[in-house]
Image (tube, rainbow, N blue to C red):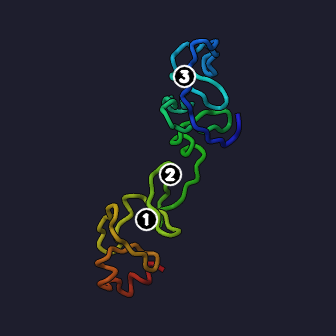
Amino acid sequence: MVLDKEESVSLVPLQSREKPRACAGCNGKIRDRFMLQALDRFWHEDCLKCACCDCRLGRLGSTLYTRANLILCRRDYLRLFGVTGNCAACSKLIPAFEMVMRARDNVYHLDCFACQLCRQRFCVGDKFFLKNNMILCQLDYEGGHLNGSAERQAQ
């Protein structure tokens, strides 16, 4: 297997005149109506699984990852080999598999992505502003509620 490879999984119909293929997972003959094709091999739908969590990787349009002879789902690949970083608001570690919010070069936990003055959380479509590397809601930004001490802390 190739290191650090991302590959899509295809569902392939088995032709009635076609000789059954051997499954790359169990070596058994594939006699099902459909088989999966991934990593240039064929699989039973139940045999293509993540090496860590055993989740089935055969959902239509799904992606699998390989590294160090492991076949992995996205979550486990990121958990094992992903890059982590720190939240710009709380400075705590953000695991590679966690959903984040981004503003310019800053990355935030979802729970930390809030106005840093009034703590208002943002919803999809809400306006926010980044001033002196602080996230501000529209009210605090336009009202000039950023006092001198908060400006010094953010720099």
Whole-number angstrom distance, CA of label 1 to CA of label 3: 51 Å
The amino acid on which the numbered mark 3 sits, given as a three-letter code, is Pro
Farthest bottom residue? 148
Q: Helix, strand, or loop for circle 1? A: loop
Foreground label between 2 and 1: 2
The amino acid on which the numbered mark 1 sits, given as a three-letter code, is Cys
Q: Is residue 107 above or below residue 69?
A: below
The amino acid on which the numbered mark 2 sits, given as a three-letter code, is Pro
Image spot of residue 115 (x, y percent): 34, 71
Quarter of the rendering containing residue 149: bottom left
- On screen, residue 134 versus residue 84, left or right, reads left
Quarter of the rendering containing residue 142: bottom left
- On screen, residue 148 versus residue 25, left or right, reads left
Image spot of residue 90 (x, y percent): 43, 65
Image spot of residue 84 (x, y percent): 55, 54
The circle drawn on residue 13 is 3
Q: Quick one: label 1 or label 3, which is nearer the N terminus?
A: 3
Image spot of residue 44 (x, y percent): 55, 20
Mark 2 sits on what residue? Answer: 95
Q: Quadrant of the N terminus?
A: top right
Mark 1 sits on what residue? Answer: 90
Q: Quick one: label 3 or label 2, which is nearer the N terminus?
A: 3
Foreground label between 1 and 3: 3
